[in-house]
Image: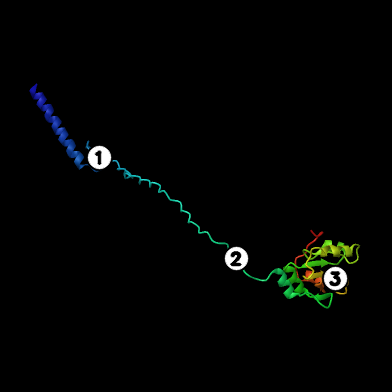
Amino acid sequence: MRGILLETLTLALLALGAGLASNRLAGPTRRLTLLEREVKAPVQAPSVARPADITPAPKASPVAVEAPRPTPRTARAPSAPAPGPSPRSVLLERCPRLQEVPQADIGGDDALWLHQRGATFVDARRSAQFLLGHVPGSRSLPAWEEGLAEQAEALALGADLDLPVVIYCSGGDCQDSHLVAQKLWLAGFRNLRIYVDGFPDWERRGLPVATGAAR
């Protein structure tokens, strides 16, 4: 029995040795792959960079802003009005009271100057023309309508009869302003100025024009 086991073991060892020799001599395509353990390095998971701990900056505490203190005002004495000629003296210096004639002619420059300084203006045209357009602030005294004398006397009441009064009509050959000037002279006015070029010249100059009835 022991002899048989030894013989069997011997045959197995010979067969194993023959197989290993044959496998070594065989080509790479026919060679048997022996069980081999591949030792692989453990794969480490990529480290995830942790965001740095960000410490929020401390909030600035609100700074109390003091309101500006009002600067005390020093009481000032009221300034005295600048000395100068009164409107009446200014008007009379440019257009003095007439002595020998009841009326005098003026052009557009003088008419504008007097209007800017508050002189009285009288429109001698018909009332329908006055409503369509007239020099601002004018009084309507139509030469050919009823009540002219009464209107002239009413205008003289309480007025300074020495101050210049400008009378105008349609200019050119229009004589309505002269007729109204006669009524005003009889009412007491002594500084009557005829705007010879009349309302058409005022419009040509591009000066303000009022419409409607006088206020």
In the rendering, which numbered label is found on residue 80? 2
Instruction: Please state if 182 lies on the left or on the right of 9 as rendered.
Output: right
Neighbours of disc 2 within 10 Å: few (<14), some (14-19), many (20+): few
Q: Are marks 1 and 3 in contact (CB under 8 Å)?
A: no
Question: Residue 204: horizontal and vertical position, in percent?
Answer: 78, 71
Q: Amino acid at mark 2?
A: Ala
Q: Amino acid at mark 1?
A: Pro
Q: Is 53 placed above or below 146 here?
A: above
Determine the residue positioned at 81% across, 77% down: 99
Q: CA distance from mark 2 to mark 3?
A: 40 Å
- Which residue was labeled with disc 1? 42
Q: CA distance from mark 1 to mark 3?
A: 130 Å
Quadrant in which the N terminus is drawn:
top left
Q: Earlier in the sequence, mark 1 or mark 3?
A: 1
Q: Earlier in the sequence, mark 1 or mark 2?
A: 1
- Nearer to me, 23 or 3: 23
Question: Residue 146: horizontal and vertical position, in percent?
Answer: 91, 62
- Which residue was labeled with disc 3? 185
Neighbours of disc 3 within 10 Å: few (<14), some (14-19), many (20+): some
Q: Nearer the viewer, mark 1 or mark 2?
A: 2
Determine the secondary structure under disc 3. helix
Q: CA distance from mark 1 to mark 2?
A: 105 Å
Q: Residue furthest top?
A: 1
Q: Quadrant of residue 106?
A: bottom right
Quadrant in which the C terminus is drawn:
bottom right
